[in-house]
Image (cartoon, helix red, strand yellow):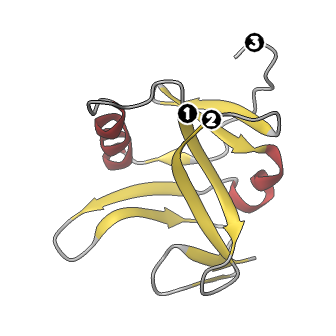
Amino acid sequence: MEGTLNITVPVSFTGNAVTEIKRLMNAEGFDTTQLLRVGVKGGGCTGMTYVLGFDTPTEKDGHFEVEGISCIMEKSHGIYLTGMEVDWQGGLNSRGFTFKNPNASKTCGCGTSFAV
């Protein structure tokens, strides 16, 4: 990551989220050149949707690390995501990553989109 801009850690991950992300990273065939992208994109029920997945860094990204997990986020997304907590729910009724975002003025029932 020579020449990249490091940013302060804008988001946090619960222990369950860290365990699930590391499980995915240790899966056979995982592309180790990709980093965990945290971000937003337009769309969803309330205007913006969370992005959480593995991706290749670009020049727009800031880099940070959480519990040994190398993460990237477009620097411009910090205004929407700083202070957010990512969790993993592994139950039968609710399974997947959830987002607790103090910057959201409105969230949807599915928990994956928000408004600011």
Task: Write down the residue under mark 2.
Answer: 56
* Amino acid type at mark 3: Glu
Distance Cα–Cα, label 1 vs label 3: 15 Å
The reply, left or right, for residue 9 in relation to residue 112 is right
Please determine whether, in this image, residue 22 is positioned above or below residue 80.
above
Which of the two labelled residues, at mark 3 and mark 2, occupies the earlier sequence position?
A: 3
Give the percent coordinates (x, y) of residue 20.
Answer: 31, 44
User: What numbered label is drawn on residue 27?
Assistant: none
Distance Cα–Cα, label 3 vs label 2: 15 Å
The structure residue drawn at horizontal position 59% and vertical position 64%, both measured from the top left corner, is 50
Which of the two labelled residues, at mark 1 and mark 2, occupies the earlier sequence position?
A: 1
Which of the two labelled residues, at mark 1 and mark 3, occupies the earlier sequence position?
A: 3
Q: State the SS at label 2.
A: loop
Task: Write down the residue under mark 1.
Answer: 35
Q: Given contact means CB atoms under 8 Å apart, are the residues at marks 3 and 2 in contact?
A: no
Q: Is residue 103 visible?
A: no
| Residue farthest along the front direction in this orientation | 29
In front of the other: 72 or 88: 72
* Amino acid type at mark 1: Leu
Q: How many marks?
A: 3
Q: State the SS at label 3.
A: loop
Q: Given contact means CB atoms under 8 Å apart, are the residues at marks 1 and 2 in contact?
A: yes
**Pair 1/2: label in front:** 2
Residue 113's image quarter?
Answer: bottom right
Q: State the SS at label 1.
A: strand
Distance Cα–Cα, label 1 vs label 2: 6 Å
User: What numbered label is drawn on residue 2?
Assistant: 3
